[in-house]
Structure formats: C-alpha cells, structure tokens
Amino acid sequence: MELELEGADLKSVLNRLRRAQGQISGVIRMIEEGRDCEDVVTQLAAASRALDRAGFAIIATGMQQCLTDIEAGRNNGEDAQQMRARLEKLFLSLA
C-alpha cells in the first residue's frame, strides 16, 4: 500500500507536523528553563494531539486511496480483507 499525499491533504498533514514540531521545541525550552511541571505536561499533551491528528489524517487518506484502488481493481492482488487488516493495524498503532 503506497500512500500519495497531494494538495490539501499534504498541506494539512505538514501543517499539523510543523505545529507539533514547534510545540515539542517549546517543551524542550520549558524544561531547560525549569518551568512549572503542569505547564510542561500541558504543552506536551498538545504536541501529542497534533501528532495523533497528523497520523489519523494520513490513515484516513490511505483508507480513501485503498477504497478507490479496490473499486478500480488496482489493489495489486491484495484482497479487501487483507487491506482492511493492514489499515486496522495502522489505525490501532495510533490509538
């Protein structure tokens, strides 16, 4: 299963990843400055959510592409059940 992110999907995922990158940099800076534990954890949770959302967006795009491939007969010999199992495994890796 090859994932192709284009246009709005690519821009959305990259924006989420950049946001997470900025939040992680902020967490590092906060720790180095000895900031309050609650503030650090709050910022870390925000970074984690941003990463999760990027991952879910990638999986959603992958599911859409897989369904399109199945309908068009371009599933490289992989049956729908195998593809479903692979996508479920990906989804659960983020849960």
Image: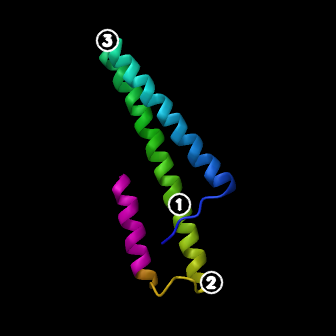
Residue 84: x percent and y percent?
Answer: 42, 74
Magenta portion: prevailing SS class: helix
Residue 92: x percent and y percent?
Answer: 35, 59
Residue 69 disc label: none
Residue 91: quadrant of the picture: bottom left
Residue 5: quadrant of the picture: bottom right
Q: Nearer the viewer, mark 2 or mark 3?
A: 3
The residue singled out by tag 1 in the image is: 60
Q: Please report the bounds of the magenta region as a residue range.
A: 82-95
Task: State the residue at coordinates (39%, 71%).
Answer: 86
The residue singled out by tag 2 in the image is: 72
Residue 34 disc label: 3
Alpha carbon distance from label 2 to label 3: 56 Å
How many discs appear?
A: 3
SS label for mark 3 = loop
Asked whether the residues under the numbered discs 3 and 1 touch, taking CB atoms below 8 Å apart as contact, a structural biologist would say no
- Magenta region includes residue 92: yes
Task: State the residue at coordinates (64%, 47%).
Answer: 11
Residue 13: x percent and y percent?
Answer: 57, 48
Q: Is residue 28 above or below residue 67?
A: above
Task: State the residue at coordinates (44%, 23%).
Answer: 26
- Magenta region includes residue 61: no
Q: Characterize the local packing of mark 2: few (<14), some (14-19) or many (20 or more) Cα atoms within 10 angstroms.
A: few
SS label for mark 1 = helix
Q: Nearer the viewer, mark 3 or mark 1?
A: 3
Asked whether the residues under the numbered discs 2 and 3 touch, taking CB atoms below 8 Å apart as contact, a structural biologist would say no
> What kind of residue is marked 2?
Ala
> What kind of residue is marked 3?
Gly
Alpha carbon distance from label 2 to label 1: 18 Å
> What kind of residue is marked 1?
Ala
Identify the mark nearer the N-term, 2 or 3.
Answer: 3
